[in-house]
Amino acid sequence: DAGITQSPRHKVTETGTPVTLRCHQTENHRYMYWYRQDPGHGLRLIHYSYGVKDTDKGEVSDGYSVSRSKTEDFLLTLESATSSQTSVYFCAISESAGQANQPQHFGDGTRLSIL
Amino acid sequence: LAKTTQPISMDSYEGQEVNITCSHNNIATNDYITWYQQFPSQGPRFIIQGYKTKVTNEVASLFIPADRKSSTLSLPRVSLSDTAVYYCLVGPNNYGQNFVFGPGTRLSVLP
């Protein structure tokens, strides 16, 4: 399995507090992604990164920010958490992007509850 | 962005072959077809990928007709441990923007 570690695995916090989720990879892959998964919605892309300090928005980026200061780490921050951000968050990596479809490899997720 | 349609759920029995079909009528020339499997409390796991005709690996086979407007994931002799959600994705994965996961197909394997 791809070396992807998400931390924390579970977190409960209160509305209005800042939250940072970490994704760490040991594969040296260039591309990293953050998704959220909610019942009835499948996985939705929040933000992605195509290199150190290179990030862009996905489908549901409002209320989230990301940073990538090193190849191996991709951080997702909720500046002021809201109850609507209660979800399971998945990090994914891929070796490359382009004409040939490069499969993504996923971490085991972070279950975040915002009360 | 190619939209996909697949059954919401399927039931099968242990030892049977399971075929899950995905429709993708507006697939583009450079799009690949990728299938993932997801167990509860885990992230999706890559199963198989193809562009045309048939692809087989140690886990599954993927059948893609000439017009590429659909694809069929075939799981031979399923076991209880194959109970999971299966996602069909179509796209070139340009920076993940075209990776749109729908609700998938929930496969239940019964004893």
Image (spheres, coloured by chain):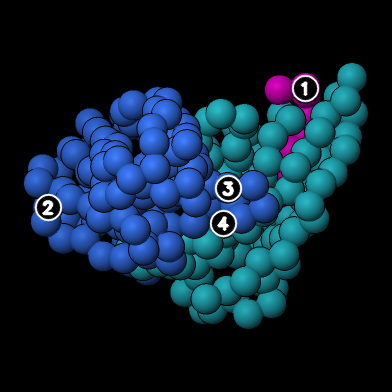
Q: Which residues are magenta?
A: B73-81
Coordinates of residue B1 in the picture (x, y in percent):
52, 76
Q: Between marks 4 and 3, how big is the CA–CA gap?
A: 11 Å
Instruction: Characterize the local packing of mark 3: few (<14), some (14-19) or many (20 or more) Cα atoms within 10 angstroms.
Output: some
Coordinates of residue A80 in the picture (x, y in percent):
30, 49
Q: Is residue A62 magenta?
A: no
Q: Amino acid at mark 4?
A: Phe
Closer to us: B97 or A39:
A39
* Tag 2 near tag 4, CB within 8 Å: no
Closer to us: A24 or A57:
A57
Q: Which chain is indicated by disc 3?
A: A
Task: Tell me: B23 left or right of B101.
Answer: right
Q: Quadrant of the C terminus of chain B?
A: top right
Q: Earlier in the sequence, mark 2 or mark 3?
A: 3
Q: Colour of chain B?
A: cyan
Q: Which chain is blue?
A: A
Mark 3: secondary structure: strand
Q: Which residue is mark 4?
A: B101
Q: Between marks 2 and 3, how big is the CA–CA gap?
A: 29 Å
Q: Amino acid at mark 1?
A: Leu
Q: Which residue is mark 3?
A: A38
Observer-side mark, 4 or 3, equals 3
Mark 2: secondary structure: loop
Q: Which chain is indicated by disc 4?
A: B
Q: Which residue is mark 2?
A: A52
Instruction: Characterize the local packing of mark 2: few (<14), some (14-19) or many (20 or more) Cα atoms within 10 angstroms.
Output: some
